[in-house]
Image (spheres, rainbow, N blue to C red):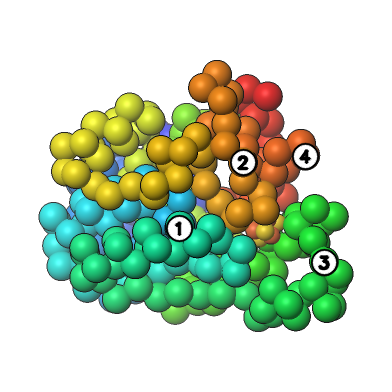
Amino acid sequence: MSRIFESEKGSIARAGLLEFAGRLGEPSAEELLRWAVEGFRGRLALSLSFGNAEGVVLLDMLSRLTDPAGVRVFTIDTGFLFDMTRRYRRKVVERYGVALEVHGPRLSVAEQAKKYGERLYERDPDLCCAMRKIEPQRWALKDCDAWISGIRRDQTPQRANTPQIRWEKRYGVVKVSPLAAWTAEDVEEYVEEYDVPLNPLLGKGYRSIGCEPCTRPVAEDEDPRAGRWSGTQKTECGLHFAGGKVERAVS
Ligand code: SF4
């Protein structure tokens, strides 16, 4: 079986994925999106961070393939996002006319500070991410059968073996990653060709954007994700990998 497919036996066979994987090998992003929309209609959600370009590229691609209203679109607002990211989010919502679901953590920033102390993200970022990202993600996906993600293999060493389709046990959904095989250059070309709007922070030295306290701009010769949780061993929030401690491509 090619890298396209990874699952727990029996969990996905019902969705026809085996047949699909065998028939197409490694399909294009558009083919995979079309297949996911047709196969999981009404039970499928696209997640966007509004930090990087990939999510909006997928939203744009969806808008060209089908009615984006047929697919749920959601984002997680941790309460720690850049104001510029929220402004950009409004612009994207307007442009694509999408009914965006915004999911957030149980505790407000102030409530979290009262219960766990100020700046938990500095003392225990894994706990902070678990409460402010992963738990809301579970809520967002609880009625879904499939999740479309913008993850790419060349983003980090741990993402290098990302299959296009896998069973995501933690959320109980099929995870579809249409851009798994894309490079940063592929994303740039798509953005240019279709005039996809980008988070303005990407033009200010930020090349991977998450929560404001855990993101800094990076130098030209740094790994794009070096500005995430800079100065710590953490490189993943845990949305894509349990544990989340992986090596940066360049440190
Ligand atoms: S990225 Fe930082 S601020 Fe955001 S949830 Fe994780 S630890 Fe908290």
View quadrant of ligand 1 = bottom right
Image: 207 above or below 165: above
Residue beneath disc 3: 118
First along the sequence among labels 4 and 1: 1
Q: Is residue 238 visible?
A: no
- Taking the spot 69% from the left edge, 69% from the top edge, the residue there is 131
Residue beneath disc 4: 232
> What SS does tag 2 mark?
loop
First along the sequence among labels 2 and 3: 3
Question: How many angstroms separate mark 4 from mark 2 (CA)?
Answer: 13 Å
Q: Nearer the viewer, residue 12 or 67?
A: 67
First along the sequence among labels 1 and 2: 1
Q: Position of residue 146 (x, y in %)?
A: 39, 64
- Taking the spot 80% from the left edge, 53% from the top edge, the residue there is 122
Q: Is residue 230 visible?
A: yes
Q: Position of residue 235 (x, y in %)?
A: 66, 41
First along the sequence among labels 3 and 1: 1
Residue beneath disc 2: 216
